[in-house]
Image (spheres, helix red, strand yellow):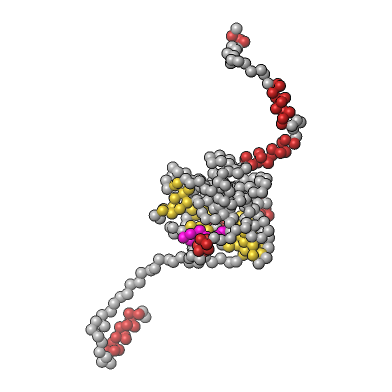
Amino acid sequence: MNSSTYFRQGLLSLLTLGVALPLGACVEREVVYQPAPPPLVEAAAPVVTVNEAPPPLPAYEQPECPGPGYLWTPGYWAHAPAGYYWVPGTWVQPPRPAVLWTPGYWGWGGGVYVFHAGYWGPHVGFYGGVNYGFGYGGAGYEGGRWNNGVFNYNTAVNNVNVTNIHNTYNTTVINNVTVNRVSYNGGSGGVAAQPTPQEQSAMHESHFQPTAQQMQHQSAASSNRALFASENHGAPAIAATPRPGAFNDRAAMPARAAVAERPGGGEANGGMLHPESAAGQPQAGEAHPGTPQPGHEQERAAQAPRQQAHQPHPPQQRNQQAHRNAPAPHPHPRPPQRPQQER
């Protein structure tokens, strides 16, 4: 029996008892309820604590953005009973326009490492000062911005095909942070960063949970043994994907081979075009904008001392010997000799 039936029976009973009703009370009005738009909800995730620090972030290149409206979510180390496993970075469609992704991070506290889950919100909050690259240099996000409901990509730090995606701009990113591959905040060897007032404000805003695709992406990673650090030793074969769960896509990116760390700074973490550096300029071992294979300069720099150790003479003696063996300069260039067989 619905509410309209109850209303009619009650009205009939009042009339039977001779109760006077005001004019218009006998007119039944149907109330139509319009569903309210879904509100932002607080991101809820089970608390994960581990006694062992997560491995360093692997270095990798960013897959090309699959299309307009996708936002980059960097990869991270998650934890299962079998140990740490890598959740590949991927391009994701946000749950609604005008929201940005705050990456999750591991933080030291109470004698354990606690994972603070990522979330969607109007502003980017605190993510431990961890340099995830591709616009996430440790504070805020420089990879893009919303403009009238359309996301605009910063091609300085994102792999975007401007032929297919036209809402782009190019702004050099300057980060005043140490560029390294540390994946956690606080504790021994962790990033020493505290949330700014702006980040604290963003942390207290209403948030969206990770999307269903993001959760499925992480679940698939947890069931892939090759992504566990115990199997890949910190260099997963699938470090980034063009879409959530696309582990077998030909555009999926593997981790680059580990290289020696820079004195006092460490290796830059996987910037596809050019990793953001502490002073806004590529540091030792980092590629300049447009370099197709970043990281090779650092490998050569690490090999240089070993190569010099096997040289028979110091560099100054080699230069002097080469000068003595060099032919005498000619005042004028000699014309090329004709081949012998034409004589």
Question: Is residue 121 shown in magenta?
Answer: yes
Front residue (pair 140, 120):
140
| Nearest the eye: 153 or 18 | 153
Q: How many marks?
A: 0
From the viewer's perspective, tell me whether residue 339 is left or right of residue 312.
Answer: left
Above or below for 4 versus 49: below
| Residue 313 sits in quarter | top right
| On-image quarter of the C terminus | top right
Residue found 50% across the figure and 51% down from its top: 142
Please say if 148 is above or below 342: below
Q: Main secondary structure of the magenta part?
A: loop
- Residue 75 is left or right of residue 18, and the answer is right
Q: Quadrant of residue 21?
A: bottom left
Vertical relation: 240 (above or below) 105: above
Q: Nearer the viewer, residue 203 or 315?
A: 315
Q: Nearer the viewer, residue 285 or 6?
A: 285
Picture quarter with the N terminus: bottom left
- The furthest residue to the top: 343
Query: Does the magenta-highlighted stretch encompass residue 90?
Result: no
Residue that sits furthest to the bottom in the current view: 17
Is any part of residue 188 visible from this angle?
yes
Residue 212 locus on image (x, y percent): 51, 60
Q: Position of residue 276 (x, y in %)?
A: 56, 47
The residue depicted at 72 percent of the width and 24 percent of the height is: 321
Which residue is found at the position 59% from the left and 9% from the top?
Answer: 342
Query: Which residues are drawn in magenta?
Result: 118-127
